[in-house]
Amino acid sequence: MAEAPKIELFIKASIDAQSVGNCPFCQRLFMILWLKGANFTLSTVDTRKAADVLKTLAPGSQLPFIIYNDEVKTDTNKIEEFLEEILAPPTYPKLCCRYKESNGAGEDIFRKFSAYIKNPNPGLNDRLEKNFLMTLVKLNLYLMTPLPYELDKDPDVTESKRHYLDGDSLTLADCNLLPKLHIVKVVCKEYRNFTIPAELKGLTRYLEHAYKEDVFHHTCPVDSEILEAYSAVAKYLSK
């Protein structure tokens, strides 16, 4: 039996310099390693002292990064590809999507959210909110549309009941999207009193299932950490 690799994950620390900080890329890799069932050590890095840590361990890079058997890897997308390739069946589960469309679902949400939440002009709010809402509607449509495996089981099914983007199990696509959706949910409630409409049944179902998963719930930063991170860029609208 091959010896288990030594894996160290370095992510952004919270304000207390110990807990998980606000960084969807950090949470993404944390979730992937957790879902893989790999043994790894987690180090939260205080960004106020990060320069010293990075200079020593990963010069010229940013958080997150991993050290895999003494080899430093720094690009989040490349790390994801590497872990999927190296932590492979039969020892580790496969996490890639069956359907390529699942990988791109929700990809425009964070950009429209950023424009919406950083806008200080009340006159522009309705248009920006509508643009943002349309991205949620588009994701909801994907989550409500039956995937081929569901149609194979029942050709007459008209509405998907799946839990996640690609089926009933979390995949790499979910590890990418869910941390961003959590930030969206927390920040929009605080700055715009906006909550995801209950009419978006697919998206509501998606988040409800995700929050029940330890791998998601326990890798999320606390709400106050997210709000602190956005305090410099998000704008309240003057009444």
Image (cartoon, grey):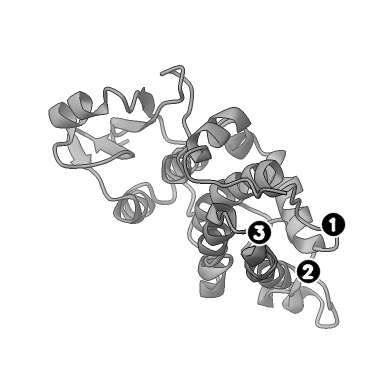
Marks 1/3 in contact by CB < 8 Å: the verdict is no
Of circles 2 and 3, which is in front?
A: 3
Classify 158 as above or below 97.
below
Left or right for 186, reference 74: right
Element carrying mark 3: helix
Residue 107 location (% of width, % of height):
52, 65
Classify 51 as above or below 138.
above
Q: What residue appears at the point 74 percent right and 74 percent down from the top-left corner?
A: 146
Residue 218 location (% of width, % of height):
59, 30
Element carrying mark 1: loop
View extreme (front): residue? 239
Marks 2/3 in contact by CB < 8 Å: the verdict is no
- Report how far apart the C-alphas of labels 1 and 3 lie in the structure: 25 Å
Residue 87 location (% of width, % of height):
37, 46
Towards the viewer: 50 or 164: 50
Left or right for 167, reference 67: right
Three-letter code for the amino acid on which mark 1 is drawn: Ala
Q: What residue appears at the point 14 percent right and 30 percent down from the top-left corner?
A: 55
Q: What residue appears at the point 53 percent right and 61 percent down from the top-left corner?
A: 115
The answer to whether residue 220 is seen in the rendering is no
Q: Sequence order check: which comes first, mark 1 or mark 3? A: 3
Quarter holding residue 216: top right
Residue, disc 2: 160
Left or right for 16, reference 45: right
The answer to whether residue 143 is seen in the rendering is yes
